[in-house]
Image: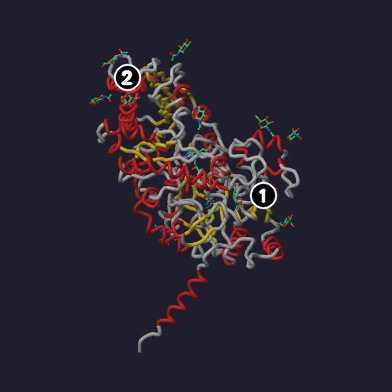
Amino acid sequence: MAPDFTIFAGLLLAITASASPACKLTPYDPEWPSHAEWASLNSSINGQLLSTVPVASSCWNGIPFASPVNCSTVQSNWANAAWQSRFPEAIDYPIYANNSCLPPNASGYVAGRGCSIGGMPQYIVNATSEEQIATALKWAADRNIRVVVKGTGHDLNGRSSGAFALSIWTYNLRKLERHTSWRNPSTNTSEDVYIVGSGQQWGNLLDLALEQGRVVTTGQDPSVGLGGYIQGGGHGPISRTYGLAASHVLQMRVVTTEGKILVANHAQNQDLYWALRGGGPGLYGVVTEYVIRHRPAPRNVIMGNLLIAPRDDGSNHSAELSWDAAVAHLSELPDLMDAGLAGAAMMAVGESAMSFGSLNHSTTGVVINQVFWSFNSTPAAMEALVNPVLSNITRAAGGNGSITVTFTASNTGRYSSFYSAISGSEVAGGESLVSSRLLGRAELVDTPRHKQKQYLKIAMRAQNTTAGTYATIGLQGGPGVRNTREEDWGALLPAWRSAYLHFISNGAIVDCKAAGSPKRALENAARWNEAKEEMWREWSPSSGAYMNEANPYTSNFKQDFYGSNYDRLVDIKAKYDPSYSLFVLSGVGSDEWDYDLDTGRLCKGN
Ligand SMILES: Cc1cc2nc3c(=O)[nH]c(=O)nc-3n(C[C@H](O)[C@H](O)[C@H](O)COP(=O)(O)OP(=O)(O)OC[C@H]3O[C@@H](n4cnc5c(N)ncnc54)[C@H](O)[C@@H]3O)c2cc1C
Ligand SMILES: *[C@@H]1O[C@H](CO)[C@@H](O)[C@H](O)[C@H]1NC(C)=O
Ligand SMILES: *[C@@H]1O[C@H](CO)[C@@H](O)[C@H](O)[C@H]1NC(C)=O
Ligand SMILES: *[C@@H]1O[C@H](CO)[C@@H](O)[C@H](O)[C@H]1NC(C)=O
Ligand SMILES: *[C@@H]1O[C@H](CO)[C@@H](O)[C@H](O)[C@H]1NC(C)=O
Ligand SMILES: *[C@@H]1O[C@H](CO)[C@@H](O)[C@H](O)[C@H]1NC(C)=O
Ligand SMILES: *[C@@H]1O[C@H](CO)[C@@H](O)[C@H](O)[C@H]1NC(C)=O
Ligand SMILES: *[C@@H]1O[C@H](CO)[C@@H](O)[C@H](O)[C@H]1NC(C)=O
Ligand SMILES: *[C@@H]1O[C@H](CO)[C@@H](O)[C@H](O)[C@H]1NC(C)=O
Ligand SMILES: *[C@@H]1O[C@H](CO)[C@@H](O)[C@H](O)[C@H]1NC(C)=O
Ligand SMILES: *[C@@H]1O[C@H](CO)[C@@H](O)[C@H](O)[C@H]1NC(C)=O
Ligand SMILES: *[C@@H]1O[C@H](CO)[C@@H](O)[C@H](O)[C@H]1NC(C)=O
């Protein structure tokens, strides 16, 4: 007998509707839990539930929130990432929380806009135990409530906030211990490790490690947290030498949205362990603890400073040759990195170039400010590597003084002095949308120079050509990353293996006032960035981008951020978060959802 198709289809619909409802709940929905239900959640988690209090609410009259900090303190600290990281709801880029409560004169501030919860989570679990997290996660998943996870709130893509969500705030998971004979379950051998709470910040771990003659895979600023940094990959001053942060994790403890408390390593929950090492933050569960490898601290650090600028005559000729110099410089970096150098560069055009290069004339050229570092070496050794390269750069730029090149190298001493020298910008509160790419020999050496020059000019395009813009170029790939053992690789984007440079380009204007809302400002910037994204795909079709510092609106995010790991990650996501409680922008499976910053609604389908 043929099945009755109408009954069959109806049944299927009913199942789909109850298993994955179209939208996550909002307080405007009748199913939203009552105050009494929230209170009962609160008592089941030792009273650790917070109602969201925007820290900047002290700047607004007649607002029913009691911020613990007065407005002048909020204003003077707003642009500081380390300060923002201390508050339960605060994020570094509040545009992703719809600029719902800004202090006057902050970037994106609109007079009269007021202060509301808006794009911030409704409630926050100030977690102090795994049991609290498990209870809260299951409670939210059972009720179809969106969950977000916040460590520091440093995320560039707004992934640690979300309207109408319950937030798990990990700040108080601050374990910080050395364990010199931790049993590695994959080998049964004993390992010397740090065991660290996921709410910790790298600066604290680095301080402890350096006291003990060790070094760990931090980023460039001490306030960056372990949580999202590791799960997205995590590059920093030692990644050229030792590989990325995700490759240094031997085990995680994880709480899932089904309320399970799991241990993930090479011996159990291997798929989760794999996904959490580079497969994207805020997606698979809440990590509470990491077991981390460490390395010997360098004895001394050599730093070098290289400045390449068009001759200060404002001529088209020296401007054009400065682009040739820039291409020549980038082409030399893979060899320099293989020979032992790491570092970071700023490349600037327009008024930014004038200030970077101390130019008196405006220029249509480009200025490069390159910092190099190397470990356990000497200034003379660094000069021996760099000086021949400078002749090549000068030759590429006509060889007749059209560009100026200056280079100095010196001994910075201990790693702690070096780290203080490179860190500390800790910038927050800005409105920007970057476009980035991982570049290797195929792009920097094998691509014809005239093509590279065309691509570079597009990468450096600024929407405001007078102001110009800058790019940050990290020398963070290379041998340490390439030589990472397969078992330590996890779900890192495969393109990292051949990457040398992480090129982050700015230049898009994000202007909420002009656009009318954060949603439209981001949409406009994303549309303008598409030309850069197309250029990257043409220059480096098989490469990708570092998801933690990239354009979260790129249409190509699956390939660019996850590469060939994507489909497997979708399955792991569905296994550990079947209710899809954990949505993040450009996260695995996020293309099936639409998060509307204007309405705050997170709904399935577009
Ligand atoms: C000042 C500054 C400097 C930076 N420097 C570097 C750098 O040198 N190298 C580099 O690679 N990146 C750097 N970044 C980018 C950094 O990788 C991202 O901002 C990253 O998101 C930081 O992770 P977090 O946990 O501190 O941030 P959060 O905003 O708290 O979290 C980021 C993401 O991770 C998720 N998450 C956090 N904790 C957990 C957890 N315990 N379990 C599950 N999910 C979690 C969140 O849900 C969110 O999706 C920098 C950022 C800033 C603001
Ligand atoms: C949760 O309970 C604690 C302790 O009773 C209380 O201080 C806090 O305000 C409660 N949180 C909420 C959101 O009501
Ligand atoms: C704000 O708080 C700071 C630090 O607590 C204090 O020094 C300052 O006087 C306060 N300012 C005002 C206007 O109350
Ligand atoms: C905002 O900036 C303007 C112009 O700089 C200044 O006059 C005003 O006092 C500032 N407002 C506050 C609240 O700081
Ligand atoms: C977001 O901001 C826009 C205007 O800036 C506003 O119209 C909208 O209601 C806000 N949405 C939320 C969820 O706060
Ligand atoms: C979070 O909980 C800890 C431990 O109970 C407490 O000391 C801290 O004050 C709480 N933070 C907030 C913002 O309530
Ligand atoms: C490690 O030891 C456990 C328990 O003794 C054993 O079951 C497991 O097979 C061992 N694993 C390896 C890789 O030797
Ligand atoms: C120099 O002038 C040529 C011809 O007008 C132009 O195509 C080129 O873009 C200019 N180069 C720079 C760097 O301004
Ligand atoms: C800019 O002008 C000042 C004053 O004339 C001069 O001292 C300086 O050397 C100039 N800078 C460059 C890069 O030529
Ligand atoms: C300089 O350029 C030449 C030609 O491209 C190349 O063969 C040589 O290796 C370069 N020298 C250095 C030190 O990079
Ligand atoms: C360098 O040479 C070019 C021709 O190749 C010439 O146009 C330019 O003026 C020269 N620049 C200097 C500073 O001599
Ligand atoms: C472009 O930048 C210049 C210089 O910084 C500034 O004066 C001008 O207002 C900007 N134009 C726009 C449209 O933002």
Quarter of the image for the N terminus: give it: bottom left
Category of crowding for the residue at label 2, using alpha-carbon neighbours closer than 10 angstroms: few (below 14), some (14–19), many (at least 20): some
Q: Amino acid at mark 1?
A: Ser
Q: Could you say whether the residue bearing mark 1 is in a helix, strand or loop?
A: loop
Quarter of the image for residue 504 reads top left
Residue labelled 2 has its Cβ within 8 Å of some atom of ligand 11: yes
Relative to residue 363, is residue 98 depicted above or below?
A: below
Rendered residue at 35%/86% (across/down): 2
| Between discs 1 and 2, the one toward the N terminus | 1
Determine the CA span between mark 1 and mark 2. Answer: 54 Å
Question: Position of 36 compared to 320: left or right?
Answer: right
Residue 48 in view in this figure: yes
**Is 165 in front, or is 278?**
165
Q: Nearer the viewer, residue 595 or 330?
A: 595
Q: Is residue 170 above or below residue 514?
A: below
How far across and down, in percent of the image, does residue 522 sit? 50, 45
449 displayed left or right of 134: left
- Say the numbered circle drawn on residue 116: 1
